[in-house]
Every structure is written in structure tokens, then in C-alpha cells.
């Protein structure tokens, strides 16, 4: 029996957040995500889980209410571990058990988790909460609070914040302020100070280069950028579009829309050669783009962001002259041209892992400098403690002027980058600083390498769990025959590649294809989607070309 748990209170409160009968949810790529009306009990229970996790690791834990890139009607929850990482995978199973427990089993499952995970009930628990701008988020975050309170946990509700801001706060809190102040002003000050320092050293840019148009996906990014704007130096002038005052979240706009459809968002007035970018619904992803003089749209996705950052950091690391190992982490969605450029031209080792920031983050921790980005624009850079210490020391005491200056730039990059998770605001400032320092236009950045034509499609099936993959999701294990079919289709085209995987955030199977021409890519993607439809239990009408 658990000394501090009031079973009557638990019963009473869980009855106020009932689980819809028969509903079973899977812990997905970034936590639970589905229609908002199905999530009240999940939020309450994730409040319970956060208290248990907080007691187990004797640290503050974060709970973010958001469904990020999903439609406005959806919602979800992301759990944040002590240093701002995603919830440790070993706890995903506990989260799933709690989310799916029948009400009468709840107490037993809590006791089980406490035993298995050695939760010390006598420790205090503190949970930081944040939410995005969805209409359902406020009420759902109240359910999280109910869950925290019933187990005697304390909480601090940050209200409306971006997901990466909440990750940042959790990390600040658990490092006793070493990473920064656990307040929004602290976040704005730290990032803008580092950015201002960096930009000071850039050659003065022409008027047109100072402007950046931002599609905020009608989400939280607009609010937080407006708050941060007064902190920005005059070298950057931002123009916000899709600020949520008129249209629905993520509807025909936002980073996911732009990446998937390879076209500009609605509501952003784009003139030729203007530098533009899109955030997603909770501002943890960013993609850039522009339209050339002929009206042709050019997307600069997470792969090109990773490349730009890697080029910049590699040059600085060479100047600093220390043996610091840098690597890039990607997923199967990375454009083949980006991997080739990084490995063959830039000579940086590249690693491929499964989709999901948690996997990329984990791999990137193995290196002195780990750059990780998903093609969809979700990513950041991690510096090991040893690398950071060395860089800060050189920036302070380095005898050689050139080395010291390079170390100072790296030091400001470390402060500007949100190392806890991909962060659209931080990534945007990193990119803007690099472009300014290198005197690069968006077109020059785009021209570093040419993307292979690629296509992303979705297919609905009766149960997407029938698709099981291996080899960082590049190969299908079940249903039988599907991989052989994909292999045969891929063989028909040049420079081609294709894979399929069940999404962990939407009820669909995702299809990726690339090949030598857009026409061939689209044909391959369509043929693969038909194979999925026929061999994996497609729902509704077959996919149309
Ligand atoms: C989440 C994850 C990302 C992932 C994306 C799509 O992003 O954090 O790592 O790439 O989902 O995942 P899936 O293909 O499994 O649906 P977000 O921005 O929606 O939280």
C-alpha cells in the first residue's frame, strides 16, 4: 500500500475523468495523440504519471498539452524528462498501461509502477505544465492538474508556451539555473543576447536581407514571437503571418503542410526571392522557402538546415583546432542528396535512426557535437559537456586570436541553440545568424546541393499496426510480400528509394519515395501506396494518382 495515496480521492477524481469504454490508445512517436474529446482521461492520468516520474527521478517533469502539427480538433500530450529530453522509453510502457487501464485497475497499476520503477513515495513531486493554442488545450491541462494534485504533487502552470519553451524551463529548473532561468523572460534574454553577439560580427547586410517572413501556422509561435520581438536586434526584422487571429491552426499552413505539399502556405504573401519560413503548431519545427523570379517554389527543409549548420560548425571547429567529433543524425526521410553531400563533400559521418526526435536526440548524444534534424524541420544541435567546457575555456583564455574568436562564436551558438529539443524560434535565430555571418542569401543556401525529387503520401488502412518495420524503418517485415513488392517497384526507376511506415501521430501509413525526376517519383510513390492499400488492408477507395 502506498502511504501517501488517498484511494478515495483517486477514485473520486478518476471518475470525473472517465475513460471512454473500449478505447485503447498507443503511445506514439511523441506521446498520445488523437481527437481531443477522447483525451480527458489520458491527461488526468498523465498528471498521475508525471508525479510518479518526478518522485522516481527526484526532479521536475514537464507535461505539454499539444498535438503539434495535427489538425485543430486533435490534441495530445508530450512528457518532458529532467534535462528537457522526451520521456525515457522505459516509461512509455507505464504511460500506456495508465492510459488504457479501466478505472477499477488504476490504483493497482500505480502501485505496480511504483514497485517496478522504485518510486520513492516520500519524495516531493513538481510538474511544469504548458499548452498550445488549441481550443481544447486549456481544459485538458486542467485535467493534468487534477491528476497531479490527487497524488499530492506540486505544479507550475506556464500556460501558453511553445513545446520547446517548456522543455527549456524543465532543464533550467533541474540544473538549478545553470542552463538558464526557468522563466520566459530568461529564455528570451538568453537567446537574444547570444544572437545579438553573433550578429554584431556579420558584414552589414543590404536592406532586403534583414527581412524574414514567418508563417506561424495560426499557432503558439505567433504569440511567443510577438513577445520576443522587443528583444531582437535591429538587424533582423520579422513579419508574422497566420498569427491565429483569423484562421484555424495548421489549416493549409505551417511547416508540415509546406513540407508535405511542397508549396507555400495560405495567408503568406511571398514576393520573388524573399526569405520565408514556417513554424508548426507548437513551434518545434521549422522549414524555410522562397519563390524565384519565375515563380518556382523552393523548399529548404530540415536536411538543408542540418547541412547549413554542419558547414558552419565544421569550419569553426577546424579553426578552434581541437579534436572534437561532429556527426549528423537523420532518419529515412532524409533526402538522398543531403546524405551524399554530408558524407562525401563535407566528410561528416551520418547516422540514420527511426523517426521521432527521441531517437535522434539519443544518437546525437554520442558525439562531441551532434547535429540532428528530421527532414520535416525538427532538430537541434547537442554539444557534449566536455566539448562545451573546452569551447568556453578557449573563448575566455585562448592565446591565439583566431582560435579565441572562433571559440567565442561557438560559445554564442551553444547559448543560442536550445539543446533540449528542436525549437523553431531558436533554430530560426541560428539560421539567421549563420546566413548573416556567412553573407549567404537564401538562394545560395538552397544551391549547396540539389534535392532529389521526393514525395510523401498517406494511406489509410484498417489497422496500421499490421505494418512492422526494421533497419531504421527502411524495410518492412510484415505484412508478408510488401517489402518484395516495394523492392520490385523501386528497381523500375533511377536513383530511386521508397519506404513505408505506420505514423505514430496520425491514423495513417506514411509513404516516402524519391527518384531521378518528379514524374518518376510521383509514379513510384503512387505504386507503393497501392501496394500498401492492397497488402496492408486499405480502407475506403484505392489511392488515386
Ligand atoms: C512528431 C515527432 C517527430 C515526428 C513527427 C511525425 O512531430 O516529434 O519526431 O517526425 O511527429 O511522426 P509520425 O511520422 O510518426 O507521425 P510533431 O511536430 O507532430 O510533434
Image (tube, grey):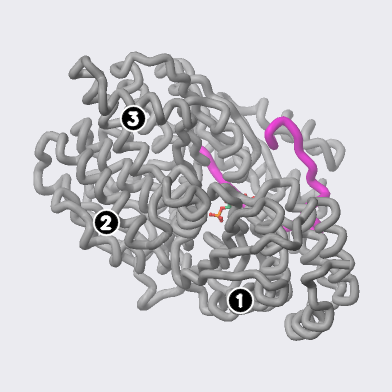
Pointer 3 and pointer 2: residues touching (CB < 8 Å)? no
- Residue 392's label in the rendered image is 3
Q: Quadrant of residue 435?
A: top left
Q: Is residue 386 above or below residue 276?
A: above
Q: List x then y, in percent, for residue 545.
A: 60, 50
The residue at 57%/60% (across/down) is 62
| Cβ at disc 2 under 8 Å from ligand 1 | no
Identify whether 491 is placed above or below 119.
Answer: above
Q: Nearer the viewer, residue 76 or 458?
A: 76
Residue shown at the point (38%, 41%) measured from the top left: 300
State how many labels appear.
3
Q: Which mark is residue 213?
A: 2
Position of 34 compared to 67: left or right? Answer: right
Disc nearest the viewer among 3 and 2: 3
Nearer to us in this view, 207 or 477: 207
Disc marking residue 140: 1
Distance from Cα at disc 3 to Cα at disc 2: 34 Å
- Residue ID at (78%, 59%): 96
Q: Earlier in the sequence, mark 1 or mark 3?
A: 1
Considering only vertical position in the picture, is 391 above or below 527?
above
Screen quadrant of the N terminus:
bottom right
Asked whether residue 332 appears in the rendered view, the answer is no
Q: Earlier in the sequence, mark 3 or mark 2?
A: 2
Answer yes or no: is residue 98 visible: yes
Question: Is 465 contained in the magenta span?
Answer: yes
Element under label 3? helix
Label 1 C-beta lies within 8 Å of the nearest ligand 1 atom: no
Where residue 194 appears, as percent x and y from the top left, is 27, 44
Mark carried by residue 116: none
Q: Earlier in the sequence, mark 2 or mark 1?
A: 1
Q: Which residues are magenta?
A: 454-473
Amino acid at each position: 500500500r502506498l502511504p501517501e495515496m488517498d484511494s478515495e480521492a483517486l477514485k473520486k477524481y478518476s471518475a470525473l475523468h472517465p475513460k471512454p469504454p473500449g478505447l485503447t490508445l498507443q503511445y506514439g512517436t511523441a506521446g498520445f495523440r488523437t481527437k481531443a474529446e477522447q483525451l480527458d482521461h489520458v491527461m488526468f492520468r498523465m498528471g498521475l504519471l508525471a508525479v510518479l516520474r518526478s518522485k522516481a527521478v527526484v526532479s521536475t517533469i514537464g507535461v505539454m498539452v499539444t498535438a503539434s502539427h495535427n489538425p485543430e480538433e486533435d490534441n495530445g500530450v508530450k512528457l518532458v524528462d529532467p534535462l528537457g529530453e522526451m520521456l525515457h522509453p522505459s516509461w512509455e510502457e507505464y504511460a500506456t498501461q495508465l492510459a488504457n487501464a479501466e478505472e477499477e485497475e488504476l490504483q493497482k497499476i500505480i502501485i505496480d509502477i511504483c514497485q517496478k520503477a522504485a518510486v520513492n513515495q516520500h519524495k516531493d513531486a513538481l510538474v511544469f505544465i504548458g499548452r498550445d493554442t488549441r481550443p481544447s488545450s486549456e481544459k485538458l491541462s486542467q485535467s493534468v492538474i487534477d491528476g497531479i494534485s490527487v497524488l499530492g504533487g506540486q505544479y507550475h502552470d506556464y500556460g501558453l508556451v511553445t513545446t520547446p519553451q517548456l522543455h527549456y524551463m524543465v532543464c533550467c529548473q533541474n540544473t538549478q539555473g545553470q542552463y538558464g532561468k526557468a522563466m520566459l523572460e530568461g529564455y528570451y534574454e538568453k537567446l537574444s543576447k547570444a544572437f545579438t553577439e553573433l550578429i554584431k560580427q556579420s558584414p552589414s547586410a543590404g536592406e532586403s536581407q534583414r527581412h524574414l517572413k514567418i508563417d506561424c501556422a495560426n499557432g503558439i509561435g505567433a504569440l511567443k514571437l510577438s513577445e520576443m520581438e522587443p528583444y531582437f536586434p535591429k538587424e533582423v526584422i520579422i513579419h508574422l503571418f497566420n498569427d491565429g487571429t483569423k484562421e484555424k491552426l495548421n489549416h493549409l499552413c505551417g511547416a508540415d503542410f509546406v513540407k508535405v505539399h511542397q508549396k507555400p502556405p495560405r495567408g503568406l504573401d511571398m514576393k520573388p526571392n524573399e526569405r520565408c519560413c514556417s513554424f508548426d503548431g507548437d513551434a518545434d519545427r521549422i522549414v524555410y522557402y522562397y519563390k524565384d523570379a519565375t515563380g518556382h517554389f523552393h523548399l529548404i527543409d530540415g536536411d538543408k538546415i542540418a547541412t547549413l549548420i554542419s558547414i558552419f560548425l565544421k569550419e569553426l571547429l577546424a579553426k578552434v583546432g581541437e579534436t572534437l567529433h561532429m556527426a549528423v543524425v537523420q532518419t529515412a526521410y532524409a533526402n538522398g542528396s543531403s546524405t551524399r553531400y554530408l558524407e562525401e563533400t563535407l566528410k561528416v559521418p551520418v547516422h540514420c535512426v527511426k523517426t521521432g526526435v527521441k531517437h535522434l536526440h539519443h544518437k546525437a548524444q554520442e558525439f562531441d557535437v551532434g547535429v540532428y534534424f528530421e527532414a520535416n524541420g525538427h532538430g537541434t544541435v547537442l554539444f557534449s559537456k566536455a566539448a562545451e567546457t573546452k569551447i568556453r575555456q578557449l573563448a575566455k583564455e585562448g592565446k591565439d586570436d583566431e582560435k579565441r574568436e572562433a571559440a567565442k562564436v561557438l560559445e554564442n551558438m551553444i547559448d543560442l541553440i536550445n539543446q533540449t529539443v528542436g525549437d523553431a524560434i531558436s533554430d530560426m535565430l541560428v539560421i539567421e545568424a549563420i546566413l548573416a555571418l556567412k553573407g549567404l542569401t537564401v538562394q545560395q543556401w538552397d544551391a549547396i546541393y540539389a534535392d532529389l525529387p521526393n514525395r510523401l503520401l498517406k494511406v489509410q488502412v484498417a489497422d496500421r499496426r499490421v505494418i512492422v518495420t526494421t533497419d531504421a524503418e527502411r524495410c518492412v517485415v510484415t505484412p508478408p510480400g510488401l517489402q518484395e513488392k516495394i523492392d520490385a517497384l523501386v528497381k523500375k526507376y533511377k536513383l530511386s528509394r521508397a519506404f513505408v511506415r505506420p505514423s505514430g501521430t496520425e491514423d495513417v501509413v506514411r509513404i516516402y519515395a524519391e527518384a531521378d525526376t518528379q514524374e518518376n517519383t510521383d509514379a513510384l510513390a503512387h505504386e507503393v501506396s497501392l501496394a500498401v492499400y492492397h497488402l496492408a488492408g486499405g480502407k475506403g477507395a484505392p489511392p488515386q494518382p
